[in-house]
Amino acid sequence: MRREQVPGVAPRPTTPYNPGSYRVLVRHAGSSGFVTLPETSPPDRPRWRAVAALWLGWYLALIVFQQIVWARFTLDRPDYAYPWTGDMTGGYADGPATGPWFYARWDSPRYVAIAREGYRPDGGPGDDRAAFYPVYPLLMRAVHTLMIAPLGLGDWSAGGHADAGYALAGIIVSAGMSLAAALAMYALAWDRLGPDAAWRAAFYLLIFPSALYLAQVYTEATYLAFALAMLAALYRRRWLIALPLIVLATLTRPVGLFLVLPFAAAWLRDWWNGVRPPRWALIGVIAPPLAWLGWNRWLASLGVDPAEVYASFNREILSVRGLLDLAGDVIYIFREPNGVHVALDLVMALGGIALCLLALRRQPGLALYGLAAIGLPLSSGQLTSMSRYVLAAAPIFLVLARAGERPVFDRVWTVISLLWFALYVVLYVHGFWLA
């Protein structure tokens, strides 16, 4: 590319110098020749296709790796990750012969039951469906109705396991939502940190130790898609987009309630700086609690007490029993060799809290949301599933992405995360306790 230059006037670059860009020929006044000066490249643009390609490679590698793990070896049973998990892991898990059920473990059958039958009136003995929020199973039902049933797979019983069509619908929803979550994380980090950090944030999200849940029959991908997209829209002040997303996130996971913290912080910051944000946008602070209350009132109309359901999972906020259970779990780490899993859950929780605290000065509203997302389940006195719950804390990935500017940290964290990720995949495939 050649650019003509007015004699005696030095060129003014419009963007920062990039030594890897193309060059331009400039004639200097009083000179008979040309000299080459570095030219700047056009401003970088989001590489959505590259993120989608990254996600596709990650997704296919994970799905195939789960098959390889099953075919290559098995694990001695039962699993004493926690004192009580031995009674739950005596039998072998479903294998690839069960089709989509191979990617459905632990809580997954509950989502399938809700997608198929809904929530039972008056509850019933052992009926704990009220602890699982409706958006994800509703999406499963929609996919089953529009895609699975027309293909004649509505009554599919893979390997003798019924309702395989609903399990397949759950996989499809999780796949699409995990792509949306990666793209939303990329957009959020792009605005906050720039293009290079945005790429790292999306990559770190996909290789996070518990990110395998993004591809299984679980709500993690759906919640992250709504929550991260809401945050990206919020920081671009797209209030009309952020409003429905914050409600959908709240009805996907209860932790979505805490998204009102960054929402309120963004609105108040604009108001304090004289930007005059629209007053109607404050609906975003009111709507999630109203949606949550409406959901619980509807459950009550069915004769279901959500508090009793949560208590059946030992999820009681700041209860004495819960605090004693938490102390017992910590003691278990030092008493039993198998306590390493409890130690990993503890490290995950404490590490997530530390990273959110690091984000507190730069992004207080977002950091408080991350702390609440980790603190809510931790306050019940349970370390179980903390590796999965930490995924909701978006500030973690922004702090990691910023730290990843240092090549040594980037490589070391990538190795640690992938090894941890692989360990969790092995446990999940063989039906051992994970989260």
Image (tube, rainbow, N blue to C red):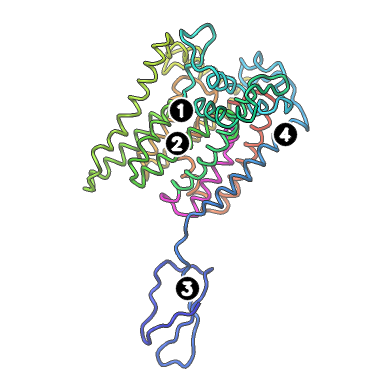
| Residue at point 55%, 33% (across, down) | 173
Q: Which residue is mark 2?
A: 226
At label 4, the amino acid type is Gln
Q: Is residue 211 magenta?
A: yes
Q: Which residue is mark 3?
A: 39
Going from N to C along the chain, the mark reached first, 2 or 3, is 3
Pointers 4 and 1 in contact (C-beta within 8 Å): no
Query: How dense is the environment of label 4, judged by Cα within 10 Å: few (below 14), some, or many (20 and up)?
Result: some
> In this rendering, is residue 85 above or below 17?
above
Looking at the rendering, the stretch of residues picked out in magenta corresponds to: 190-214
Q: CA distance from mark 2 to mark 4?
A: 29 Å
Of tags 3 and 1, the one toward the viewer is 1
At label 2, the amino acid type is Phe
Image coords of residue 51 (percent x, y) = 55, 49
> In this rendering, is residue 44 above or below 188?
below
Image coords of residue 280 (percent x, y) = 25, 37
Considering the numbered disc 1 on the image, is that residue within a helix, a strand or a loop? loop
Q: Which residue is mark 1?
A: 252
Pointers 2 and 4 in contact (C-beta within 8 Å): no
Going from N to C along the chain, the mark reached first, 2 or 1, is 2
- The quarter of the picture where residue 342 lies is top right
Answer left or right for 377 relative to 175.
left
Considering the numbered disc 3 on the image, is that residue within a helix, a strand or a loop? loop
Residue 121 appears in the picture as rendered: yes
Considering the numbered disc 4 on the image, is that residue within a helix, a strand or a loop? helix
Q: Nearer the viewer, residue 221 or 312?
A: 221
Going from N to C along the chain, the mark reached first, 3 or 1, is 3
| Residue at point 43%, 31% (across, down) | 249
Numbered label attached to residue 67: 4
Q: Is residue 426 magenta?
A: no
